Amino acid sequence: MRYALTAASFLVLAGCSHSTPAPSSSPTSQTQEAPVSMQALVAAPDRTDADRALDAGRNPAALLEFAGVRPGMKVAELMAGTGYTTEFLVRAVGPTGKVYGENPKVVLERFAEKRWQERLARPVNQNVVRLDRELDAPFPPEVNDLDVVVSNIIYHDTTWLGVDRAKMNTAVFQALKPGGFYVVLDSSAKPGTGIADTETLHRIDEKLVRDEVEAAGFKLQEESNVWRNPQDTRDWNSSPGAAGERRGTSDRFALKFVKPG
């Protein structure tokens, strides 16, 4: 496995992408809890200033709506990083839900450990289960019947980290319950480039992602155009550390896949 992870590239690991706020029923979880306002979660008074500073470029409320996260669900985030998105997920599932935050060893050792620990120590995150595992096998056997798994601006990192993406996607498929959602968001590369720009520009070919996820048995259910940017030339580095004033303006795809059943 290749571990040439840079500080600039890691800034995208816990990122959040934009998606279409659209009605989405729970895939399988039925609870008696009232639906929550995703925008109210963003406005929660106990959120940190550091997290709030990231909201404008990440649109977490839209992501939660697109993913269909609801109270009482069991959800997971791949490569959670320091947990910006993980905390939104646990707020959305509420006290009766559960969130699994997975991180590979290299991410924890080089970048995330201290801030991840601090995140998990906050009372709001008491229903987050920490998973220190590699992306080839992100979940232990007891983690199953998940409602939603989120891959948030990290799919491109799996390529040059040497992850076996077929194994990763199959593991996600197996961990989800029938009707569960696999939500993948990332910055788009030019069509036909495959994985060529994953390390240099922090972008990936959307068609490659679709093909790989569908090969694991998923069906594409919905996509979002909210964060699409036709003016993006897709020839510049979209990582937060390199994008400068263009940060948050890259053309981004948001895909929601469903496990048939």
Image (spheres, rainbow, N blue to C red):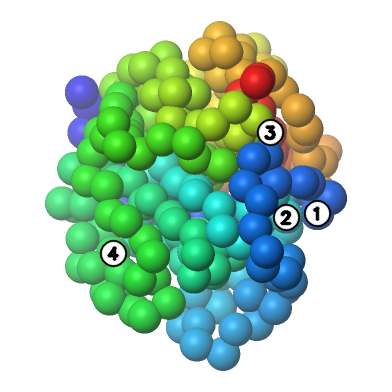
Looking at the image, residue 5 lies above or below residue 74? above
Callout in the foreground (3, 2): 2
* Residues at circles 2 and 4 in contact by the CB criterion of under 8 Å: no
- Give whichever of 192, 260 is nearer the camera: 260
Q: Residue at x 78, y 46 (%)?
A: 24
The kind of secondary structure element at disc 4 is helix
Specify the amino acid type for callout 2.
Glu
Query: In the rendered structure, which disc, 1 or 2, sits on the residue that comes first in sequence?
Result: 1
Specify the amino acid type for callout 3.
Leu
Query: In the rendered structure, which disc, 4 or 3, sits on the residue that comes first in sequence?
Result: 4
Q: CA distance from mark 3 to mark 2?
A: 13 Å
20 to the left or right of 101 = right
- Give whichever of 44, 192 is nearer the camera: 44
**Badge 1 is on which residue?**
21
**Badge 3 is on which residue?**
255
The kind of secondary structure element at disc 2 is helix
